[in-house]
Amino acid sequence: MQIRVDCYAGYRGEETPRRLILGSCRIGIVAVEDRWLAPEHRYFKLIGDDGGLYIIRHDTSRNVWELTFYTTQEARSHADGLQRP
């Protein structure tokens, strides 16, 4: 799913997502949990101000952002509860 992403370019020029725009919804980024590189993509694991967990990727050759994974805070809490003895 293609999305819009507002970014902040730090002092080294690396863009960090600050807001996701999904249709008419705007989700602020509370935390960047992880980031990694693939040959043609940059990936970010993010926590939104709605409590959701998002994994997005940036296609650097086409300059396109995509949502690759999403789960709610409730789903994560439920899954954590199932894993604990």
Image: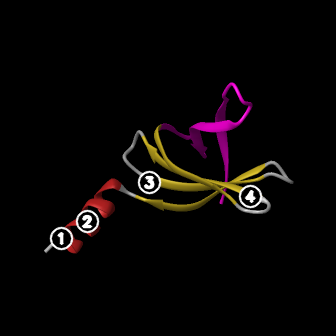
Alpha-carbon distance for marks 2 and 1? 7 Å
Q: Which residue does the numbered mark 2 point to in the structure image? A: 80
In the image shown, does 15 or 76 lie closer to the viewer?
15
Mark found first going from the N terminus, 3 or 2: 3
Amino acid type at image mark 4: His
Alpha-carbon distance for marks 4 and 2? 29 Å
Q: Quadrant of residue 84?
A: bottom left
Q: Which residue does the numbered mark 4 point to in the structure image? A: 41
Amino acid type at image mark 3: Leu
Residue 28 screen position, x and y as percent: 49, 36
Residue at (45, 43) in percent of width and height = 48
How many other residues sit within 10 Å of disc 3, few (<14), some (14-19) or many (≥20)? Answer: many
Residue 15 falls left or right of residue 22: right
**In contact (CB < 8 Å): disc 2 and disc 1:** yes
- Can you name the residue that lies furthest to the right here? 61
Q: Quadrant of residue 50?
A: top left
Which quadrant does the N terminus fall into?
A: bottom right
Amino acid type at image mark 1: Arg
Alpha-carbon distance for marks 3 and 2? 14 Å
Q: Which residue does the numbered mark 1 point to in the structure image? A: 84
Q: Which mark is residue 53?
A: 3
Alpha-carbon distance for marks 4 and 1? 34 Å
Mark found first going from the N terminus, 4 or 1: 4
Residue at (49, 38) in percent of width and height = 29
**In contact (CB < 8 Å): disc 1 and disc 3:** no
**In contact (CB < 8 Å): disc 4 and disc 1:** no
Magenta-drawn stretch, dominant element (helix, strand or loop): strand
Report the magenta residues as a range: 1-29
Which quadrant does the C terminus fall into?
A: bottom left
Mark found first going from the N terminus, 1 or 3: 3
